[in-house]
Amino acid sequence: MNSLGDLAQNLMLRSYGTRIRNEVNTLTRELSTGEVSDISGRLRGDYSHLADMDRSLRRLSALSTANAEAKLMASASQTSLGTVEETASDLSEALLAVSISNQAVSHAQAGVKAHGALGTMISALNTSVGGRSLFAGIATDQAPLASADTLLSELRTALSGLSTPADILQAAQDWFDDPAGFVATVYEGADQSLAPIQVSEDTEVALTRRADDPAFRKALQLASVAALAEDSTLGLSADTKTALFKQVGADLLGARDGIVALQAETGDAEARIEKAATRNGAAKGGLELARGELVGADPYETAIRLEAVQFQLESLYTTTVRNSRLSLVNFLR
């Protein structure tokens, strides 16, 4: 009868143990990753289909990231627009109410409210998300508008010496439309809008509104005029202030409509972003399923194989321990 020497038997057991441990590691890795270890064997050396799937998945991952960023920007923009619209509506109601009372105290309160409303609008348009300004065009690293005090200081000069509501409102509009006026002294964003954002394979979303948009300029113009109505350097009479507040209050309703139109535009963008996200998710899920069928490891089968191999390893350890206890002394006992 042939037999192995102790050294040869020990080497054989070690080799067998190494092979089993390697198999345990392989099966454990397959169970945790969901992929077979021998991808080349599974694909018979043809990686072209798998490579195409992986490229598509990377593309979808990038689009999903862009989609999430666009969604965040659109949502924040909608919030800012809501603040501007609500502020314009509140100021309009307040000024129309003041125009009825025609009292000095009411005039002073209206001026304070208009100044506060102007600051609120500017703050909303200076909103940034993740360090990126929403309404500064491509100059996303800076706020698009200077402070309310800077705006009023510049506009005050343009209105100086005027005494009728019509002249004051016309001069204010001219200053806001003049490239050397509002744009040169108050608007600090870029003159180039952000490029459309690719949020899916077939969808681009444009979030291109800037703080110098005509709808924003109109609201800022009217709030500024109301804030300056009580300015002592203009020296307006009580009747002129009353008439000015009445006209500004009425005009703000029209300016509000412009902001509402921008809200609708942004809402449409939000809906398109959401639909694109759904399509991206469906495409990604389909590709991942197909990839799993191509190189995936069956979790049930892998678990059964792993359990069997672990049992073999435990049996090997038991046999090794028993063999290590054998000796001539123990045998003679």
Image: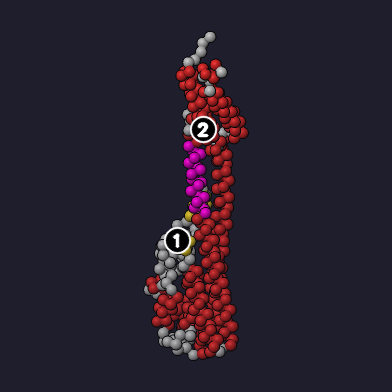
Q: Which residue is mark 2?
A: 25
Q: Earlier in the sequence, mark 1 or mark 2?
A: 2
Picture residue at 51% right of the left edge, 17% below the top = 328
- Decide whether the magenta segment is chiefly helix, strand or loop: helix
Distance CA(mark 1)–CA(mark 2): 45 Å
Q: Nearer the viewer, residue 181 or 10?
A: 10
Q: Which residue is mark 1?
A: 131
In the rendered image, residue 322, in percent from the top left (x then y), is placed at 55, 23
Visible residue check, residue 178? no
- What's the amino acid at mark 2? Asn
Q: In the figure, 159 relative to 50: above or below? A: below
Helix, strand or loop under label 2: helix
Helix, strand or loop under label 1: loop
Task: Classify 10 Å Cα crowding around label 1: few (below 14), some (14-19), many (20 and above).
Answer: few
Q: In the figure, 39 relative to 204: above or below? A: above
Q: Is residue 112 magenta?
A: no
Magenta span covers which residues?
51-68
